[in-house]
Amino acid sequence: MARVVVDVMLKPEILDPQGQAVQRALPRLGFEGISDVRQGKRFELEVDGPVDDAALARIHELAETFLANTVIENFTVKVEEEK
């Protein structure tokens, strides 16, 4: 069994109000020196069997059609660990 991670982030040109809210709060909480914050989503998928090219292609399709809105978001797919 393997874990595949899909990270989804807003494209750089898309406004990130949640990230901006976190960025504005950081100095009030004593965290200085952070110039930008972008918030995203992380999906961890436990895959039965080997993660071969076919499995990665299916996960890429899943991410592209269901997990990410590709008009405003980018995503990456990677195998995190083998179990």
Image (cartoon, helix red, strand yellow):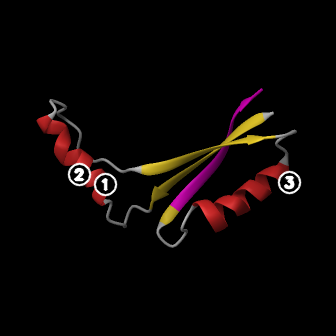
Answer with left or right where residue 1 lies relative to residue 70.
right
Does residue 77 belong to the magenta stretch? yes
Give, as a single range, the part of the protein colored magenta: 74-83
Say few, some or many: other residues with alpha carbon within 10 Å of mark 2 (under 14 / 14 to 19 / 20 or more): few
Say few, some or many: other residues with alpha carbon within 10 Å of mark 1 (under 14 / 14 to 19 / 20 or more): few
Above or below residue 15? Residue 50 is: above
Residue ID for mark 2: 21
Name the spot of residue 83 as percent of width and height, x first: 77, 26
Name the spot of residue 5 as percent of width and height, x first: 63, 43
Q: Marks 2 and 3, how far apart in space?
A: 40 Å
Provide the secondary structure element on which disc 3 rests: helix
Residue, x 54% and y 68% (percent of image)? 69
Answer with left or right where residue 56 lies relative to residue 66.
right
The disc, 2 or 3, on the residue closer to the chain's N-terminal end is 2
Residue ID for mark 1: 18
Name the spot of residue 30 as percent of width and height, x first: 15, 29
Question: Residue 45 lies in what quarter of the image?
Answer: top right
Front position among marks 2 and 3 = 2
Q: Which quadrant would the N terminus be assigned to in this image?
A: top right
Residue, x 76% and y 35% (percent of image)? 2
Residues under numbered marks 2 and 1 in contact, where contact means CB atoms less than 8 Å apart: yes
Name of the residue lying farthest toward the bottom: 71
Q: Amino acid at mark 1?
A: Gln
Provide the secondary structure element on which disc 2 rests: helix
Residues under numbered marks 2 and 3 in contact, where contact means CB atoms less than 8 Å apart: no
Question: Residue 68 lies in what quarter of the image?
Answer: bottom right
Query: Which mark identifies residue 39?
Result: none
Residue, x 31% and y 47% (percent of image)? 37
Name of the residue lying farthest toward the top: 83
Residue ID for mark 3: 54
